[in-house]
Amino acid sequence: MAGQGNLILGMASGYAAKDLRPFVQSLAMTGFRGRLVLFVYSGQRTSIRDMVNACAPALDLDLVVIDGIRKYAKLWRSCFKRLFELMPAESFPGLKRRMLRFQGMPHVTRYFHYQDYLARHDGYTHVLLSDVRDVVFQDDPFRDLGTGLHVGMETDTLTIATEPFDRDWIMDAYGEAMLQRIGGCQISCSGVTLGDAASVKTYVAQILEEAMSFPFKKMKTRIYDQAFHNKLLHCSQLGPTRLCQPLQSMIATVGCLTESQFSLSADGRLLNEDGQAAPIVHQYDRHPLLVHAFEARILV
């Protein structure tokens, strides 16, 4: 479903404008007519705005300035950390939320910003939560999108237990019992998730509920978004959810695929097995073949 009711949210804090150009320009090339929201530090706003004005001037862009410990010099970061060590975070959930939103890893803090934006802006019918540095678009990601969540799946040759990073995240977050429960499941990547607005709002709230259940002293340094995402999915805690298989769906999560599995069109688009271009390509930067093809098509 295309239209003004579609919204894309992405955390862009710390990225240079050039890192965001493939994401932004490829989106504009699809004819996307919704709103793109990027969360940035104040020092990024001018360069990103200039880039968008130059390569995608028709795009409806909202740059939301956020605060975070990583925008400060090392001395100030050290002071913040020492101050937060004295704060009774676990006794006051509101305080803990503010502290984690400020000091936590961007993989997790982005969900606080997503929730805040969605609470302040009604009227969107569908929402995409997306990584921004390693995602390109080949078609409008909301075309013919129905209800429920759509999540990107990794290659089915790996499981949570056999992929080292995912195994460690689940073990560190939830322990051996959870690994035994879901370790044999196919990995879902948390970097691209979309669906109707109500489903996405519920999903964001569930991710944050998981984050807030851990002690601040632990959570402030962990990138548990992937662990939360897979635990919720494979423990059947999400609502209706479509598993988007790579090269078979609207989300091509290609990081763990091999280049021999890729089929490109004459104009450099990655094709699904049915010969149609995948609307969203994630983790393309792991493959020089795709980087060269997409740069030739997009960065003109």
Image: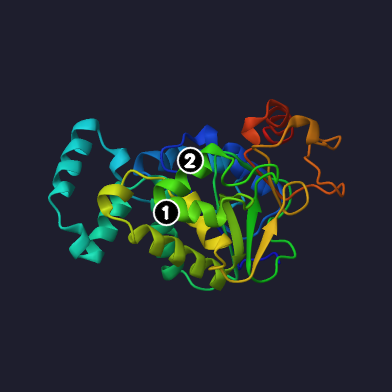
Residue highlighted by disc 2: 48
Q: Where is residue 163 in the image (x, y as percent from the top left)?
A: 57, 40
Q: Is residue 233 left or right of residue 108?
A: right
Regarding mark 2 in the picture, which secondary structure is present there? helix
Residue toward you, 97 or 163: 163
Q: Where is residue 1 in the image (x, y as percent from the top left)?
A: 71, 67
The residue under the point 71% across, 53% down is 31
Q: Is residue 130 left or right of residue 271?
A: left
Q: In this view, does 95 lie to the left or right of 35?
A: left
Which callout, 2 or 1, points to the residue nearer the camera? Answer: 1
**Residue 62 tag number:** none
**Residue 174 tag number:** 1
Q: In which quarter of the image is the C terminus?
A: top right
Residue 67 visible from this viewpoint: no
Quarter of the image where one finds residue 259: top right
Residue toward you, 159 or 272: 159
Q: Which of marks 2 and 1 is nearer the N terminus?
A: 2
User: In this picture, is 64 found above or below 294?
Assistant: below
Regarding mark 1 in the picture, which secondary structure is present there? helix
Residue toward you, 67 or 260: 260
The residue under the point 43% across, 57% down is 111
Q: What residue type is labelled 1?
A: Tyr
Report, in whole angstroms, how far the alpha carbon at label 2 lies from the one at label 1: 38 Å
Residue 51 visible from this viewpoint: yes
